[in-house]
Image (tube, helix red, strand yellow):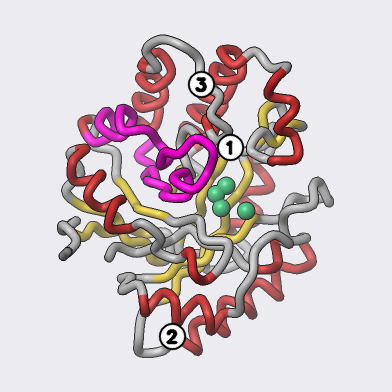
Amino acid sequence: MPADYHSHTPLCRHAEGTPGEYVEAAVAAGLLEYGISDHAPTPEPFDDWRMAAEELPQYLDWIAEAREHAAGRLPVRAGLECDWLPGCGPWIEELAGRSDWDYLIGSVHYLGGDWDFDNPKWLGRWAETDVEEAWSRYWETYAAMASSGLFDILGHPDLIKKFGFRPGGDLARFYDPAVEAIAASGGAIELNTAGWHKPCGEQYPSAGFLRRAAAAGIPLVISSDAHAPGELGRDFDKGVALALESGFRETVLFAGRGRRVTALTAPRP
Ligand code: ZN
Ligand code: FE
Ligand code: FE
Ligand code: ZN
């Protein structure tokens, strides 16, 4: 199985498991590498689903413990899932210098800086939202994040569909400019399998987006976005099959913010 670079720790307050449990799960799932990418802190307390800036040392200890546990069995990579928020550039650069990260993931969870649209807490807000407009804002924000060049991996493209709110018509009007911006940025995208377990019932991003991304030569990783040990590598057989079907032939491996590719091979039944 490919590496799984998108996973969380209890420091974000909505994930569970010990470093040892995650390592055992990674080995059991046959992952090539296990990457830890918990929700990065913001400079000031901001919401209730991420580590605090003062907790970064604890996070690094957590990663060190996982590495100890995994020694000789599989590589453990260190990353962060950073939020793309208005004006966040200098902070992301500061975070990037705080440790020897293997990769940084950039994610859009906020529209306009105050609405974390994927939070079930705000589900009611969707009913009063102009879906077409929210999608436009989401994809503009996503393209700006890619173009910033601050991130190695661009997280869960099309997360905006999480609760199943999709505008009508051909979604190419959103996908095409985003794929163009991502391809120009050189960043990799994820095929994030968590969407299969959300109301949208579909991986992030959609098959149409994946086909366009493969045709544009955008590098790919496959991610579970695990918030519990049992979710590591979840549905990777399905994810690999879909990636191959979409035209991808390799996935990317990260170390020290450098990358190399590895062939994507069909899972054995
Ligand atoms: Zn989370
Ligand atoms: Fe996320
Ligand atoms: Fe995540
Ligand atoms: Zn995520």
Distance, label 3 to label 1, CA atoms, is: 17 Å
Which disc number belongs to residue 166? 3
Distance, label 2 to label 1, CA atoms, is: 31 Å
Identify which amino acid the numbered label 3 is placed on. Arg
**208 part of magenta stretch:** yes
Along the horizontal axis of the image, is 118 left or right of 121?
left
Image quadrant holding the C terminus, namely bottom left
> Where's residue 171, x and y in %?
40, 17
Along the horizontal axis of the image, is 78 left or right of 113?
left
Q: Which residue is mark 2?
A: 70
- Which of the marked residues, 3 or 1, is nearer the chain's N terminus? 1
| Residue at disc 3, secondary structure | loop
Q: Tell me if residue 20 comes above or below residue 206 in the rendering.
A: below
Identify which amino acid the numbered label 2 is placed on. Ala
> Where's residue 137, x and y in %?
59, 20
Quadrant for residue 131, please give it.
top right
Q: Quick check: marks 2 and 3 in contact, CB under 8 Å? A: no
- Which of the marked residues, 2 or 1, is nearer the chain's N terminus? 2
Identify which amino acid the numbered label 1 is placed on. Val
